[in-house]
Image (cartoon, rainbow, N blue to C red):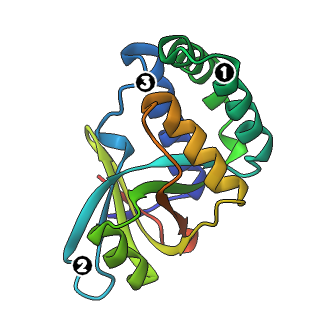
């Protein structure tokens, strides 16, 4: 593993996600999966599907909510979000800080295990490229813009999603980023 600048990770994540929306109608690829492991032992804990967050996601969260409330047709919502996220949304990596979220069932044992840790190692990998770094972990409250952003983002892809969930925010420790070659 070699050291690299934080913007390299963010640019890589944005390009993967934009490609997924443009070429695969939003179907997530391997590079959007965060592999979580213990800090001390590096023992793998789990793999989770991640949602990349904007630095200031409040306006986008409100827009997502508006788009969802415009129609009760899941297919129309899905088409709108794929069009939006495949256009220029990910073209400005400076709008993202590399933090991400994941959604869990409220009674999930995995959620309980992760939230107890407070800090884990994370690895993202796709094709021949990967990044490895520790993250701080915290539970988001429902009134937090990051919670709303994640909930509405995921609702586009799972119209049966309800608010009886937990959302964890993973905040990277950027100074410890390593590129996997």
Mark 3 lies on residue? 26
As drawn, 82 above or below 151: above
Q: Looking at the image, is mark 3 or mark 1 nearer the viewer?
A: 3
Q: Residue furthest left?
A: 43
Quadrant in which residue 94 is drawn:
top right
The answer, for residue 100, to whether it is visible in the render is yes
Quadrant in which residue 35 is drawn:
bottom left
Q: Alpha-carbon neighbours of circle 2 within 10 Å: few (<14), some, or many (≥20)? A: few
Helix, strand or loop at mark 3: loop
Mark 3 vs mark 2, CA separation in Å: 31 Å
Which comes before the other along the chain, label 3 or label 2?
3
Q: Which mark is residue 88?
A: 1
As drawn, 81 above or below 53: above
Mark 2 lies on residue? 42
The answer, for residue 97, to whether it is visible in the render is no
Helix, strand or loop at mark 2: loop
User: Which percent across, then down, holds residue 137?
Assistant: 50, 74
Residue visible at 77% across and 50% down in the picture: 56
**Which is more toward the observer, 93 or 168?**
168
Q: Alpha-carbon neighbours of circle 1 within 10 Å: few (<14), some, or many (≥20)? A: few
Residue visible at 46% across and 82% down in the picture: 118
User: Which percent across, then down, holds residue 144?
Assistant: 71, 60
């Amino acid at each position: 593993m070699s050291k690299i600048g934080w913007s390299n990770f963010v640019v890589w994540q944005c390009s993967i996600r934009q490609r997924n929306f443009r070429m695969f109608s939003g179907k997530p690829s391997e590079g959007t999966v965060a592999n979580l492991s213990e800090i001390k032992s590096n023992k793998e804990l789990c793999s989770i599907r991640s949602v990349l967050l904007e630095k200031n996601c409040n306006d986008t969260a409100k827009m997502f909510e508006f788009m969802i409330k415009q129609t009760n047709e899941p297919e129309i919502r899905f088409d709108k979000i794929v069009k939006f996220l495949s256009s220029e949304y990910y073209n400005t990596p400076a709008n993202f800080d590399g933090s991400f979220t994941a959604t869990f069932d409220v009674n999930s044992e995995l959620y309980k295990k992760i939230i107890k840790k407070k800090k884990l190692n994370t690895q993202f990998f796709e094709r021949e490229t990967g990044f490895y770094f520790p993250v701080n972990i915290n539970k988001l409250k429902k009134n937090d813009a990051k919670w709303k952003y994640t909930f509405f983002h995921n609702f586009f892809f799972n119209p049966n999603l309800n608010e009886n969930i937990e959302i964890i925010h993973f905040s990277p420790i950027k100074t410890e980023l390593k590129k996997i070659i």
